[in-house]
Amino acid sequence: MKTILAAVLLSLASAAHAAPELGKPAPDFTLSDQSGKPVKLSDSKGKFVVLEWFNEGCPFVQKHYGTRNMQGLQKKYGAKGVVWYTIVSSKEGKQGYLTPADASQRIKAMSSKAILLDGKGEVGRLYGAKTTPHLFVVDKKGTLIYMGGIDDNPSADPEDVKTAKNFVAAALDEAMAGKPVSTPSSRPYGCSVKY
């Protein structure tokens, strides 16, 4: 009896931390933003949403922010009504951890709607976020339509931004045009999330 109960509990625990599935509703969550205001994902239903995992100390993140590639995407798609949330799942004391005051300073250099603070890593684990950056795109119905790397060039060299195929931009463009996403998933690359 104890063995069966243990197996059931293990199965439930695994299901609770299973990665989200493409074509299924994106897991809902609530996190505080840089000003301490609670932000709930489902409040953005009716809009496309991008979730971007961020760690300012990661060279791969620095590649996309140093070239202004990430800010360019945030601004371009923000102007089209896309909600862009930058999520920090670094644990206190680890690389990339931000206090609300730190996040308030960082948001000024971004075109992201908000920096969401996930210091306990609960939302990062809920989404199976592995790297910074790791990106997810949610459609207007709240369905996950893309998850993976920002592009097809897993290097930290800023020069590679120019020639890379941007999967996030392609997913948004296709979905906004009413087309299926041609590359709905890819392997994320970057630094490990510092849980």
Image (tube, helix red, strand yellow):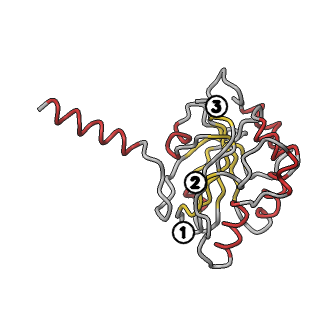
Which residue does the numbered mark 1 point to in the structure image?
Answer: 141
Q: Residue furthest top?
A: 93
Q: CA distance from mark 1 to mark 2?
A: 12 Å
**Disc 2 residue crowd, few under 14, some 14–19, many 20+, Cα 10 Å:** some
Q: Earlier in the sequence, mark 1 or mark 2?
A: 2
Res. 41 mark? 2
Q: Report x, y in % for residue 83.
A: 69, 59
The residue type indicated by label 3 comes to Ser
Which residue: 53% across, 48% down? 29
16 shown above or below 175 = above
Q: Earlier in the sequence, mark 3 or mark 2?
A: 2
Judge by depth and name the residue closer to the eye, 111 or 136.
Answer: 136
Judge by depth and name the residue closer to the eye, 151 or 177.
Answer: 151
Res. 44 mark? none
Task: Report how many numbered discs are placed on residues in the image.
Answer: 3
Judge by depth and name the residue closer to the eye, 171 or 46.
Answer: 171
Which residue does the numbered mark 3 point to in the structure image?
Answer: 90
Q: Is 126 displayed left or right of 91 in the figure?
A: left
Q: Is 119 displayed left or right of 4 in the figure?
A: right
